[in-house]
Amino acid sequence: MTASHVHAKPAAATHLSTTLGELVEALASDSAGAFTAEIQGDPATVIRRIGPLDTQEPDTLSFLSNPKYRSQLAETQAACVIISPAVLADATGLRSAIVTPDPYRFFAAVTRWWAARVRPRPAAGVHPSAVVSPEAVIGQGVHIGALAVVEAGAVIGDGVVIGSHTTVGERARIGSGTRLAPHVTIGFDCVIGERCIFHSGVVIGADGFGFAPHQGRWEKIEQLGAVRIGNDVELGANTCVDRGALEDTIIEDGVKLDNLVQIAHNVHIGEHTAMAGCVGVAGSARIGKHCTVGGAGMILGHLTLADHVHVSSGTLISRSILKPGQYSGVFPFDENSAWEKNAATLRQLHALRDRIRALEKEVKS
Amino acid sequence: MTASHVHAKPAAATHLSTTLGELVEALASDSAGAFTAEIQGDPATVIRRIGPLDTQEPDTLSFLSNPKYRSQLAETQAACVIISPAVLADATGLRSAIVTPDPYRFFAAVTRWWAARVRPRPAAGVHPSAVVSPEAVIGQGVHIGALAVVEAGAVIGDGVVIGSHTTVGERARIGSGTRLAPHVTIGFDCVIGERCIFHSGVVIGADGFGFAPHQGRWEKIEQLGAVRIGNDVELGANTCVDRGALEDTIIEDGVKLDNLVQIAHNVHIGEHTAMAGCVGVAGSARIGKHCTVGGAGMILGHLTLADHVHVSSGTLISRSILKPGQYSGVFPFDENSAWEKNAATLRQLHALRDRIRALEKEVKS
Amino acid sequence: MTASHVHAKPAAATHLSTTLGELVEALASDSAGAFTAEIQGDPATVIRRIGPLDTQEPDTLSFLSNPKYRSQLAETQAACVIISPAVLADATGLRSAIVTPDPYRFFAAVTRWWAARVRPRPAAGVHPSAVVSPEAVIGQGVHIGALAVVEAGAVIGDGVVIGSHTTVGERARIGSGTRLAPHVTIGFDCVIGERCIFHSGVVIGADGFGFAPHQGRWEKIEQLGAVRIGNDVELGANTCVDRGALEDTIIEDGVKLDNLVQIAHNVHIGEHTAMAGCVGVAGSARIGKHCTVGGAGMILGHLTLADHVHVSSGTLISRSILKPGQYSGVFPFDENSAWEKNAATLRQLHALRDRIRALEKEVKS
């Protein structure tokens, strides 16, 4: 239909090649033995890209994480597949394999090794166009990109990367190894942990939404708290975390939030909780550890979610959940005409229940 | 579980102390008598922070707005609590109290007084790195932050604060006392009122979403209107207000929109209406005065909401509402297994209604 | 109620006047005959603005696209109305008319002609405050605005407009004639087609949301793909398109996305599909050509939508749709008290179905 470049070859210029032997050895040594694997086949096999099992490209390293799809091993063109010992018997047709107990996790480690070699690496130093206050404290090996702003009293840890056009406000603190993409805003007094990754458009420390109503008008409640974010937190593009009203908004270690997520003032999110895109969490909600919220889920304010609560996509949580589990509440989609009929009937549902009751009385009498 | 700084002391460096007497007097005089209160206890009581009733910190000023929670007064550690005369009888255990008819509103005034003393205050002046057109008109006492852009023909009122990296487009006008946070975009020809607060990532005046379909393609309808925003409007982080197609998109005085709110072209929002995070309002919707929309509410296009209409969180409004009141439409969440059963049955609801009708006929016959 | 400027005259300073004759002739010649029309009335009629049929302003050019509203022709104050031949009989009261087979499309063309004359037109050249890598390749007639950043290896096509504060990352490519508003972020290696329009706050190429779970923690899967966007694509303010995990995220030619839309990694959107504000598309979803998604619709991951699938506003699509058509799934809103009753009953719906079954058995026995 079109000769557009979107149908041409992939955009990323990776230009990297390695061998199985080099890769497996590097991962083991870099991780002090956390990632070990056995190679089946020739360790000199060349790898030039990582791809899915149905790749058409030669020299691809792929992976099989779910044994359910083991039949795909017979047909893959990949030069090598990362597999678990459990599927070895199905892997006889492979040119080579990396055998490891948790293939998906090993694959993740490979992507990190790979990315460290092909992604642009910002060099340490302050771009001459950046505006860095002499009253800021800048650690060792910090990169501050073009036209970034670091205000007075900010403290930037060692090895931090601050992207172009990013603003770090007065007295904010950024922990070591954290990477702020271009166009991030860190508000004054906010504190960010170590090894965090904040994507472009993230806004930390805008005012929480607080007003006192008076004679039909809204009078501003100034937000006197800040935001505290733990270590190893990743925040997606255009995600917002508001500053607290009196105390701080808190995001604990290891939390991962996708793009366009809204975290209101005084929310508290427990360790290793993850939320997909377009989620909203209203003021003073307290979310436990190891929770997940699917895309466009919405958590109302002033309620509590226990640890290990999982909220399905599109579900609005309107009261506290004290028991771990999966919770859902979505209108099932349908062809429009069918939906219209069911939706219209839904508006009489309570009356229908009464009619069933009446029938039951009648029939039983 | 962790020694992370998120469990350490609050991030905000407030460093302010005052006495009850000083505070109450300052509020009365600053407001020309609008905020008056009586002190019960020692006016020399020192206040070093504002906090909730369950604070563990000494020297805290707290408040009780809802008499329902008056029992908490007996246990608070707060040095002073702002209360209404109605709960005086329950306040005998307090160290001191500020007695005033509307404690929440008085508390809001205290936060403003406090913030004016502890928040970074941008000094008047244009940062040397800002790019300000010689054809812009800049008022008295304006602050233009690092790397901000003010284009030709823009008119900036007295006392305006323009944050770092903020762009004010050609011929845009910003009213006196308005504060634009870092990373705000004001499009050409847009007009912003006085004393507004726009948080980081706000985009005013992007093109409305308008296309004419032609043979399966979309042909652009250029958006020839602009955006007009009244006085005392607050817009949350990453909120968007599109320019109108032919006429202007209009937000009246005193409107408050939270983060990540989408206001489409030619919407008209009446005075003192408030919308929580993640709300969307589609094109040409006309929202009345004193309305509220809960988080992730969605208002479809070309419809009218009367004054004093309140839309619950997560509710999609698909036709006009001419009568004030609270309107809701959310699938109630449940444990996933229960939801699955009910959702599946919902897809047959109209057929169930027919079966009830058939039963009624049968039973009555 | 107020003397606020929001009730004053429109914000846009259009200052353009033309005549019917000049306008119709210009459109025909500019489009090489694609837009032709006949003038009824005086070709010397002066036009000073484009507006709706109910305009109060003189010298307005309006349009009637839907013959259903033909009765409005009798009352309009417009100096001229663009109409189809089908309504000529109802147009006898008009001062003048432009008669053309598709009035809405003709109107769209008029807005483009108009905008080209009244909108600020950035001149070719690089603003001295911009930071452009000497290793970037810049085409002919390119505008690079104040404080923009173009990194090493980026390739900028002829006639591209890069707004103030916009960042184009390393090795990214921008096709000819594309316009990036202020505050856009284009990530490294991403490829954008020709004649695209990206509004402020757009983020292309942030990391997709990918993690491997391990002992209750999330281990990052680096995203090794990029984003490829076709020609004539328009993206609204604060919309995000993430880079792919292994392969690229792809948006084909002619796609239009409104504000605050989230496109996750490895999504593929077919030609001329349009999505309204606040839509989310989860990872690896494959959306066909000529689809539409209404505001706040949500498409879950790893599923397929055929060409010509239309998703209603607020609808969550949880499985593949292989048949063209309109699909919906929204809880119909109601007065809160009615909704509360129906929602409560909905949580027992499956049990109600069982009671109906039991009744049916009983009645039939």
Image (cartoon, coloured by chain):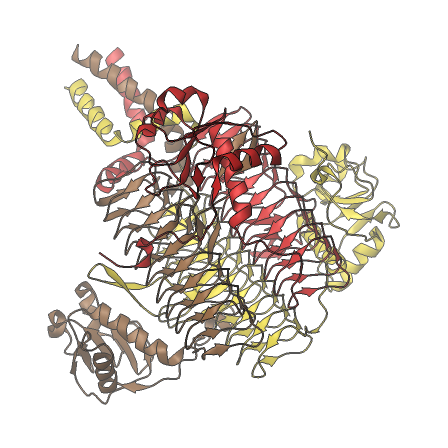
Chain colours: A brown, B red, C yellow
Q: Is residue A53 visible from the viewing direction of this image?
A: no
Residue A239 in sight here = yes
Residue drawn at x 50%, y 60% as measured from the top left? A169
In this view of the protein, which residue sits in the foreground, B277 or C112? B277
Q: x and y percent of residue C328 in the render?
A: 41, 42
Which quadrant of the structure image shows residue A359?
Answer: top left
Q: Position of residue A120 (x, y in %)?
A: 44, 78
Please state, as top left, top right, bottom left or bottom right, where the N terminus of chain C lies in the image. Answer: top right
Image x and y of residue B60, in percent: 40, 40
Could you tell me which residue is drawn at 46 percent across and 53 percent down?
A: A205
Vertical comparison of A168 with C173: above or below: above
Q: Residue at x 67, y 35 (%)?
A: C69
Q: Is A1 situated left or right of C36 in this image?
A: left
Say whether residue B138 is left or right of residue B121. Answer: right
**Does A320 sit left or right of B161 as displayed?**
left
Q: Position of residue C131 (x, y in %)?
A: 60, 75
Q: Quadrant of the C terminus of chain C?
A: top left
> Which sits in the foreground, C348 or A307?
A307
